[in-house]
Amino acid sequence: MPLYKNAIASIQIGVEDYLSADERRKLSAVRNIFSGILLLYKEKLCDLSPAYDKELFIKIDIRPHRDKDGNITYRAAGKSKKTVHVQQIKDRFSSLGVKIDWTVFDQINKIRNDIEHYYTTTPEAAIKEILAKSFVIIKDFIYHEFLEEPIDALGEACWNELLKISDVYESEKKLCVTSLSKIDWKYKTLEKAKDLIRCPACSSDLIKTDDTGEYSIATSLICSTCGNPFSFEEVISECVTEVMYADSYIAMTDGGDPPHEICPECDEDTFVFEEECCLACGYEIAHHECMRCGCGLSLGEQHFEGFCDYCQHMYDKMMDE
């Protein structure tokens, strides 16, 4: 199981990178932990591959082949040594009945991507979150898919360090979730968005509040990691965008209306069509149909006070004459 050994080694090295006093190794810790998870997944695909080619299911391009006896088998196309990417792993696990909590995996992947591309320094809080969430994925996958005790696979030192980070993170996360649940978020979109709030200063998701009652953009929040106080107004647009990401992607690729747009009243990207209002300022569409031709009015046509773009143009042209 060469990939399995490489996966374990990568995770162990990642923990060593995290414990190092050298700040330059923090990013390496993130890369190694994530790489270790992917190698575990690829090893599982090898484990499920047919006996005639134990690396078949990690090959990018697989095609059917008929042998001289008329039997159908599958072979890797071409001579490329490239292996499956994340989406292919998801697709193949789905068809092979391997169950993974992809929500947590995607969260880890997004944080990793943000650290690599958007931060000039590697935020400590984000690294701890990746290690804590990775720990859950790693221990469950090793135990359920490879039938091995995670402490035996990872070694006592690596296991205990990941366990310690995970315990501290999960304990604080429970307190944060409890405090945020005391707010009446009013809208389904915001109920989801509250779980995506991150500190503007350190990017931690360990966010709590002392407020209660109905939410407002002035709702006070505080980061449990760095102590930074901020208001919901500072993060609402980013949270709504993230909640709506999948629907926005589908609308962009398959056609259709976007699920949210910039509010004409407050200029935040928080007007959610499903909620029929702006979640930041409460603005609601005043005119649904053109008073002249009866067509439906878009959000961007609201400033014409009841006319569509074409009818407003014709009215302005008539007035100019």
Image (spheres, rainbow, N blue to C red):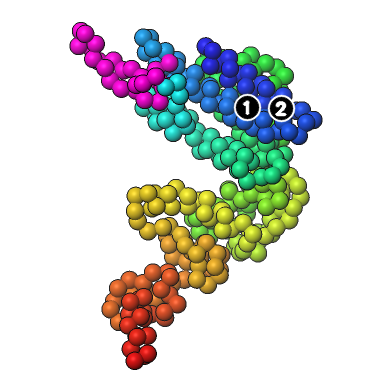
The quarter of the displayed image where residue 104 is located:
top right
Q: Amino acid at mark 1?
A: Asn
Residue 276 position within the rendered picture, expressed as x and y whole percent measured from the top left: 44, 65
Left of 92 or right of it: where is 232? right
Task: Give the extent of the magenta segment.
Answer: 55-79
| Magenta stretch holds residue 57 | yes
Q: Which residue is mark 2?
A: 17
Which residue sits at x=52%, y=50%? 242
Left of 294 or right of it: where is 280? right
Q: Which residue is mark 1?
A: 32
Q: Amino acid at mark 2?
A: Asp
Which residue sits at x=58%, y=24%? 36
Which residue sits at x=54%, y=12%? 2
Does the residue at mark 1 contact the one at mark 2 (Cβ under 8 Å)?
A: yes
Which residue sits at x=55%, y=16%? 4
Q: Is disc 2 placed on a helix, strand or loop?
A: helix
| Residue closer to the observer: 9 or 99 | 9
